[in-house]
Image: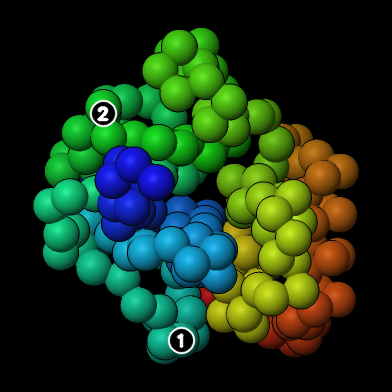
Amino acid sequence: LPSKYMKKNIVTSGQKFTDIDVLSCAVAYSELLLLEGKESEVVLPGAFNASITQVIKDWEILYATKPTSDDVEYTIVDVSNPEYIADFVTEEDIVKVFDHHVGFENYWLQRIGDNAHIEFIGACATLIWEEYKKRGQAENISMLSGNLLSVGILSNTLNFGAQITHQRDADAFRELQALHPLSEDWIAQYFQD
């Protein structure tokens, strides 16, 4: 294979902050790449916001705040406006974009074609779960990634009460819960926190 396909893939997002949707997408998508035998690293420069509670901070989540390699390509999650993407990212090295905020679909379509996954739904985490299913790795998702994606969906849809909530979000949550369930007590405590 050409060396371009052997680069480490850095999964990242915006520069200013990291919310639970960003964290869940970055960790789970990086894991998906690792399951496929690709080298990957989560790099999140933005400070964690309040959607990432202390309980979640206590989970063993591996990430860096800046890349540890130079010869890399990038997957961007939960942001598609080029102004907000992490400062260390060079646009020509972006190979995939996953986002649920619309407005830059044509911009990315012209640059990376079918590798731009930008759709108006409740959570970017739903898009990442759908990637696991498309790529035949749904049964292999770890408890950490499964729980993070579940919480990302819950948080972004305000427990399925937000207007942006889509049936795909509810389906993704149900499927993830079948594999790695969160207790109702845990979910209630998350929103209280």
Quick one: label 1 or label 2, which is nearer the N terminus? 1
The residue nearer to you, when weighing 163 against 7, is: 7
Residue drawn at the location 39% of the way across and 46% of the way down: 1
The residue nearer to you, when weighing 34 against 178, is: 34
Q: Nearer the viewer, mark 1 or mark 2?
A: 2
Amino acid type, residue under disc 2 in the picture: Glu
Quarter of the image where one finds residue 171? bottom right
Question: Visible in this render: residue 191?
Answer: no
User: What number is the disc on residue 112?
Assistant: none
Q: Position of residue 160 (x, y in %)?
A: 78, 52
**Does dot 2 land on a helix, a strand or a loop?**
helix
User: What number is the disc on residue 91?
Assistant: 2
Q: Is residue 1 above or below residue 59?
A: above
**Does dot 1 land on a helix, a strand or a loop?**
loop
Amino acid type, residue under disc 1 in the picture: Trp
Alpha carbon of mark 1 to alpha carbon of mark 2: how far? 32 Å
Quarter of the image where one finds residue 139? bottom right
Residue drawn at the location 66% of the way across and 46% of the way down: 127
The residue nearer to you, when weighing 71 against 107, is: 71
Mark 1 = which residue?
Answer: 59
Question: Visible in this render: residue 166?
Answer: yes
